[in-house]
Image (spheres, helix red, strand yellow):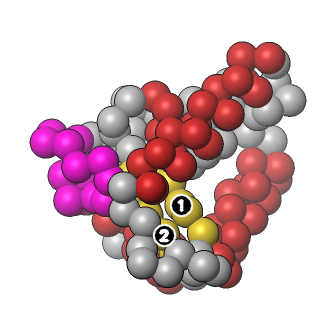
Amino acid sequence: MPSKTCLVLVVSRYRTCGCTRRPYVAGKSVPGGTVDRPLTRLHEGGDAAAVTQRQKNITAKSNACAAIRPANPTGLDRDEHPFGSTWEDSAAGTNFSVQYLAPSQNRSARATLGNWDTKDRVLHGEKSFVKIIP
């Protein structure tokens, strides 16, 4: 189970999209929170386009994180939402959020997502969304 901090980050990104961390964009609407704006699974083994898109996602995340780099980022992970394993991640435009957080929190959330993808056989190109249950 991902840490409470990671769950709060995901929830806050859907509920207060205009207030999410970089990039600050008026009217931001992070995809993946509703059935009509799903996330699309990006599996690097899916095809050559997926490998290229994943690299673009990583580069876009790095560029956005550079603008909010803490004074001492040593030991911190860079996190993004929508997830890096989706086509809708940071390289897809400005409707995404990034921030630095503790590695244990980020990696726990990443492992949970990976386990879900595996257990439910979420395949390359399949659609899903994040349902927030209060």
Q: What is the residue that sits farthest to the right in this orientation?
A: 45
Q: Are marks 2 and 1 in contact (CB under 8 Å)?
A: yes
Residue depicted at 46% across the width and 28% down the height? 92
Residue 132 percent coordinates (x, y): 40, 61
**Residue 30 horizontal side relative to residue 26, left or right:** right
- Prevalent SS, magenta region: loop
**Residue 5 vertical placement versus 84 (above, below):** below
Which residue has dot 2 on it? Answer: 100
Range drawn in magenta: 16-28
Residue depicted at 76% across the width and 27% down the height? 51
* Nearer the observer, 35 or 37: 37
Residue depicted at 75% across the width and 48% down the height? 117
**Residue 16 horizontal side relative to residue 42, left or right:** left
Q: Using the image, tell me which numbered label, if any, was put on residue 114.
A: none
**Residue 112 vertical placement versus 3 (above, below):** above
- SS assignment at label 1: strand
Mark found first going from the N terminus, 2 or 1: 1
Magenta stretch: residue 62 in it? no
Residue 125 percent coordinates (x, y): 68, 24
Which residue has dot 1 on it? Answer: 79
Q: Amino acid at mark 1?
A: Asp
Q: Can you say which quadrant of the picture contains the N terminus?
A: bottom right
Residue 49 visible to an observer of this rendering: yes
**Residue 18 vertical placement versus 86 (above, below):** below
Residue depicted at 67% across the width and 34% down the height? 54
